[in-house]
Amino acid sequence: MDVLLCLCTCPDPATAGRIAEALVEERLAACVNLLPGLQSVYRWQGQVQRDAEVLLLVKTTRQRYPALQARLPQLHPYELPELLAVESVAGLPAYLQWVVESTRPVE
């Protein structure tokens, strides 16, 4: 499959919305879902941290992933933003085609 689901956490709804809109506007994502209410527990600089975050579910393609990977750190306030891509193994064919078409760069 050509479609990827990427996970990215953000510190607050405003940041998440700004990043989501930029990724869709720049055709790096066909769709971004914002899931508020996330609690993250992680180790950072030797300390265990706990933070409220917003999770982004970013739908993109393998072809657009390198550009997404390059752009996200420019948009994100974290020193090390989370970006994890998961391959789709199946999906509604029309939806998968829509993701491909929606992320195709404008010529």
Image (tube, rainbow, N blue to C red):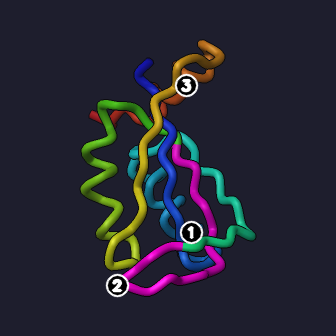
Residue 73: where, in percent of width, then height?
31, 67
**Left or right for 54, reference 75:** right
Residue marked by disc 3: 98
Residue marked by disc 1: 16
Camera-nearest label, 3 or 1: 1
Residue 107: where, in percent of width, then height?
27, 33
Nearer-the-camera pick, 38 or 27: 38
Spatial separation of the CA atoms under disc 1 and disc 2: 24 Å
Nearer-the-camera pick, 88 or 31: 88
Camera-nearest label, 1 or 2: 2
Find numbered disc 2 in the image and state the secondary structure of the residue it sits on.
Answer: loop
* Sequence-wise first label, 3 or 1: 1
Residue marked by disc 2: 45
Q: Where are the magenta residues, as a range?
A: 42-58
| Marks 1 and 2 in Cβ contact (< 8 Å) | no
Q: Disc 1 marks which amino acid?
A: Ala
* Sequence-wise first label, 2 or 3: 2
Q: Callout 3: 10 Å neighbours few (<14), some, many (20+)?
A: some
Image point (50%, 82%), residue name: 48
Find numbered disc 3 in the image and state the secondary structure of the residue it sits on.
Answer: helix
Q: Residue furthest right?
A: 37
Q: Quadrant of residue 56?
A: bottom right
Q: Disc 3 marks which amino acid?
A: Trp
